[in-house]
């Protein structure tokens, strides 16, 4: 059974579209991961500054110390949540990267199958042409 040119080229176009879609999705995930990492960095800087400020103000009142400690604990919880977000986005990015590799490989496999089919078709055409030439040559010899 022969697969038509238009069928494989359609499959290749679909595979190409899926690869490009996965690439766009991966780019969006990367931007999101970078944003989340930026937020995490900002929170860590705020925590570092607050800790430095708390150490500097050690001689202050107990109420100020409690407020500083509560703020630092709040920042620590925010950092933990942000680290979880970064891990989730990183996992999502790795999954999308794997999907992209799979789709690219699938497309390449179809392209290779199509190329092999075209090469076999060309060889078959060449064999047919050679048979016609051989038949004509044989007829010419037999007429002499």
Image: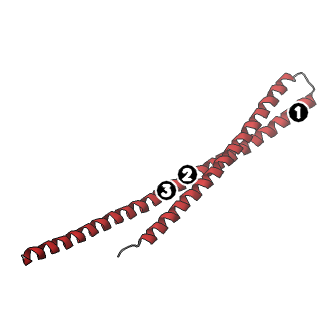
Q: Residue at x 69, y 47 (%)?
A: 85
**Which quadrant of the structure image shows residue 25?**
bottom right
Residue marked by disc 3: 104
Residue 76, x across and y down, in percent = 76, 38
The residues tagged by marks 2 and 3 sit, at their Cα atoms, a distance apart of 10 Å
Residue 97: assigned label? 2
Q: Secondary structure at mark 3?
A: helix
Alpha carbon of mark 2 to alpha carbon of mark 1: how far?
Answer: 46 Å
x and y percentages locating residue 89 in the rendered image: 65, 49
Q: Secondary structure at mark 1?
A: helix
Q: Is residue 122 above or below residue 57?
A: below
Q: Along the polypeptide, which appears first: circle 2 or circle 3?
A: 2
Q: Earlier in the sequence, mark 1 or mark 3?
A: 1
Q: Residue at coordinates 72% horizontally, 40% vertically from top-left?
A: 38
Give the side of residue 127 with respect to residue 77, left or right. left
Q: Is residue 46 above or below residue 33?
A: above
Mark 3: few/some/many CA within 10 Å (<14, 14-19, 20+): some
Q: Residue furthest left?
A: 144
Task: Identify the residue at horizontal 24%, vertical 70% (top origin).
Answer: 129
Q: Which residue is mark 1?
A: 66
């Amino acid at each position: 059974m022969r697969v038509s040119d238009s069928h494989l080229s359609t499959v290749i176009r679909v595979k190409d579209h899926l690869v490009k879609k996965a690439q766009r999705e991966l780019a969006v995930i990367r931007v999101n991961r970078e944003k989340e990492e930026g937020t995490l960095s900002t929170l860590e800087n705020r925590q570092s500054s607050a800790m430095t400020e708390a150490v500097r103000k050690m001689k202050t009142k107990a109420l100020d110390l409690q407020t500083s400690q509560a703020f630092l604990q709040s920042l620590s919880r925010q950092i933990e949540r942000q680290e979880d977000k970064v891990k989730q986005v990183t996992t999502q990015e790795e999954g999308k990267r794997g999907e992209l590799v799979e789709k690219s490989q699938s497309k390449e496999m179809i392209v290779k199958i199509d190329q092999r089919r075209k090469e076999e078709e060309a060889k078959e055409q060449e064999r047919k042409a050679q048979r016609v030439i051989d038949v004509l040559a044989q007829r010419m010899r037999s007429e002499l």
